[in-house]
Image: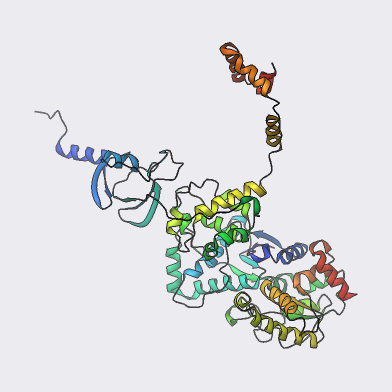
Amino acid sequence: MPSRGKNNGEKVEEEKRRYVTIYFMGKRYRVPAGLTILKALEYLGYRLIRGVGCRGGFCGACTTVYRKHGDYRLYVGLACQTPVEDGMYLTQIPFVPAEKPRYDIEKMSPSSSVVLALFPEIARCIACNTCTKVCPQELQVMDAIQAILRGDIAKAARLTFDCISCGSCTLRCPAEIQHFYVFQLVRRLYGKYIAPKAKHLEKRVKEIEQGLYEDKLNKVISGGPELWRDLAEKLIKGVEIEEVIQG
Amino acid sequence: MRIIYYPGCTVKSTAIRYEKSARGVLEELGIELIEIKDWTCCGAVYNLPTDTVAYTVAPLRNLIRAQETAKREGAEHYILTLCSMCNHTLRQADLRYRTDIDGAERLRRYMDDEPEYEKSMRVIHLLELIREFVGYDKIREKVKRSLRGLKVATFYGCLLLRPREVAIDDPEDPTIMEDILLNIGAEPVDYPNRNECCGSYNVVRNPDAVWDRVKEIAESAIGFGAKAFVTTCPLCAFNLEEGQKSRSRELRGKFLPVFYVSELLAYALGMNEYIEKEVLDWIEKLIG
């Protein structure tokens, strides 16, 4: 009689395809393939109250350190973005200890000496590049530190624009640099002192403060649903907001 | 000739006048420089113990990036440095990679994020580049304004000449800087302190020791009739300037301005736009 179901070997193979083995804090688990690390942990019943945030790869809270079977490298990823793989050894990093110094951005200048005064440890960088290797955002972290050391604050700000402050580099750095606070400072310095000023924005803010748009705004507010629908239709068609309000 | 250029931190900040004049002069002499895009610190002070390789990572990474840039740009496999410190550190790292087989293997494994260093780069200093690839004849041909017997004291410092394996000239009796200066009409004085140590980074911890050294060097140069110092090392330049100011009383108010060799070259070639105003004024005052 021909077998209608699958034989045992096929069942094992299918189960292997659908499930992977991971080790969380040294304990072995089977979880469905295709889940992110975060979802796999929740699947296993862990309730995550620290080290988890936006679940969208932006907040940098769910830093996860792992190794893979047969590979000496130490990997870092965001638990909400990294799919589980067979043979992963995992641990969650709930918090990266670092101290944010206080400073007054109004009384600074965009130079390496200003950054060095607050973060003298950046001078200990030996360009080992461990930070770059570990960055889940694939930023050139070491190059950014080097750019600061040579006084190129603009370059450092550009290189670290996508930093999510997960702190992986900060945990791995042999020079004990607190990268994410350093980078926050250089981006602030860039914004305050180097980036071109948006003149049109300054002008508009001044106009708003002078109450130039009060009447128009009140007209829109009191116009009721009919006017709002009309305005919305014009905006969808691509009419400039100024023309819409004028009209 | 197109070669790779490694600037280093100092010629991009406190010694920017050195880079400006050197780049201008080299362009005029037909050397095209391709700056490495992502250069890092050279390592500054080369680590002499042979049982640690961590401090060779930074200079080696620069050599690798230079190599990759040269391949991509189809440039000659030379890496030019202006600063003596960078020249020394990159050369030492290159030498170690070629000679210390175990160390090189450890570095290769550690730096698996970079392409392999193929030992194809030669680190070359500005002075060597002029001696070997420009030639003194070409310099002489291009001279528009002779320095007319301007008496200068060359100052090599230590790192261009020591140790012998990485020296750009005879460590005990170098002539490379004098040869260039003679060809633009300057008159280098023969004084005994030109390859002394300037005191180097001791200026941070023990400046008095450095000022004492500089006082000795300056007294000797003044005694032999020099009107200015000429160097290629930003740290020597800093120490020579600050040391003379700090020991002004002992030097009875005498002060020799410190020029980079490229500034005198730029002057001789008639390229005022590549010389800082203050430096230009000094040169003109001395030539009279």
**Image quarter of the C terminus of chain A:** top right
Q: Position of residue B210 (x, y in %)?
A: 66, 80
Residue B39 in view in this figure = no
Q: Position of residue A82 (x, y in %)?
A: 38, 43
Residue at the limit of the structure toward the top, as seen here: A226
B243 to the left or right of A182: right
Q: Viewer-proximal residue, B222 or A132? A: B222
Q: Position of residue B263 (x, y in %)?
A: 78, 69
Q: Viewer-proximal residue, B157 or A196? A: A196
Residue B48 in view in this figure = yes
Using the image, determine if residue B237 lies above or below residue A100.
below
Identify which residue is drawn at 83% across, 64% down: B272
Identify which residue is drawn at 33% across, 51% down: A91
- Color encoding of the figure: rainbow
A127 to the left or right of B216: left
Q: Position of residue A113 (x, y in %)?
A: 62, 61
Quarter of the rendering containing residue B248: bottom right
Quarter of the rendering containing residue B288: bottom right
**Image quarter of the N terminus of chain A:** top left
Residue at the limit of the structure toward the left, as seen here: A1
Q: Viewer-proximal residue, A105 or A132? A: A105
Figure label count: 0
A245 to the left or right of A45: right
Residue at the limit of the structure toward the right, as seen here: B288
